[in-house]
Amino acid sequence: METRPLGPTDLQITPIGFGAWAIGGPDYAFGWGPQDDDESVAAIHRAIDSGINWIDTAPVYGLGRSERVVAQALKSVGPSRRPYVFTKCSLVWDAQRAISHSLKAASVRRELEESLQRLGTDVVDLYQVHWSKPWGLEEPAPDIEEGWRTLAALQKEGKVRHIAVSNFDIAEMDRIRPIAPIASLQPPYSMLRRGIEADILPYCLSNRIGVIVYSPMAAGILSGAMTRERAATLPASDWRSKNPEYQEPRLSRNLELVEALRHIGARYGTSPGAVAIAWTLRQPAVTGAIVGFRHAKQVDGLLAAGSLRLAPEELARIDALTSP
């Protein structure tokens, strides 16, 4: 699989990365329903065997479970095949499992030490601020500079190789760039969420900030595996059961879009999900896409996205269906 440089760093990443959000399981506010750890480990192994060279996780995914599963999977992977491991900070939880937000220096340092312990490593390849603002609030946290200074210090100390942000807007990136360069931004991006195209992607491209997008299949609704019946029976422990994209009137529109993607994918012998991922990778500013794999067989069905180049008429058709 080809690789691309991530922003100004020395990291050469494959266009597709392993997203470890869903393997965190169901036992927190943004879980994806029941998940078997052995299947998660098998999926990670299949991804590595297929050439994927990075994993994106976070402490909050399963409240530590995702990072522990990643560590379990990597125990049997030799140094020459070990993928880059990306994780995050800013979302913390208490003894009652209530999640809150902090970018205070002491909290960030504590989060990193706990992540290093769970991951079984001495250094994180890319350490990201997960959110600039507490959930549900419009204003960024007043301590994002404090948090970013702490990440820069951890980089100098050798505990993280590169530092980055997730879910930041341009104003927030402008606030922290004078402190230390931003390796990459991790924003949501899919055919159903195109807001970053107008300003954020050009900004990142002109400032040499890598972009690794998440939810390129819009949390699975564009995968081709989701049906109306399955959407209606998602368990309460799967956050998508409350997602408007899985409910009417959006559900019917989204499933119609999937059928158009299925038609395009058939020309290449691939799935709607692979088309949806390849569509995000067409952007010059996008370095890679985070793809959530829960089972080994899912890896095989989506790998084609890394090399798929959609024809101009296919892009025009998708644009007509999804223009923001």
Image: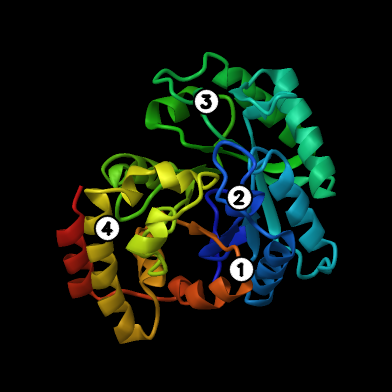
User: Mark 2 = which residue?
Assistant: 9
The kind of residue on which mark 3 rests is: Ile
The answer, for residue 209, to whether it is visible in the render is no
Element carrying mark 1:
loop
> Residue at coordinates 81% horizontally, 44% vertically from top-left?
118
From mark 3 to mark 4, how far is it between C-alphas? Answer: 37 Å
Say which of 232 and 225 sits in front. 232
Q: How is the image coloured?
A: rainbow
| Mark positioned earlier in the residue sequence (4 or 2) | 2
From mark 4 to mark 2, how far is it between C-alphas? Answer: 37 Å
Residue 295 image label: 1
From mark 1 to mark 4, how far is it between C-alphas? Answer: 24 Å
The kind of residue on which mark 2 rests is: Thr
Work out whether 157 lies above or below 48. Answer: above
Work out whether 3 lies above or below 32. Answer: below
Quarter assignment of residue 5: bottom right
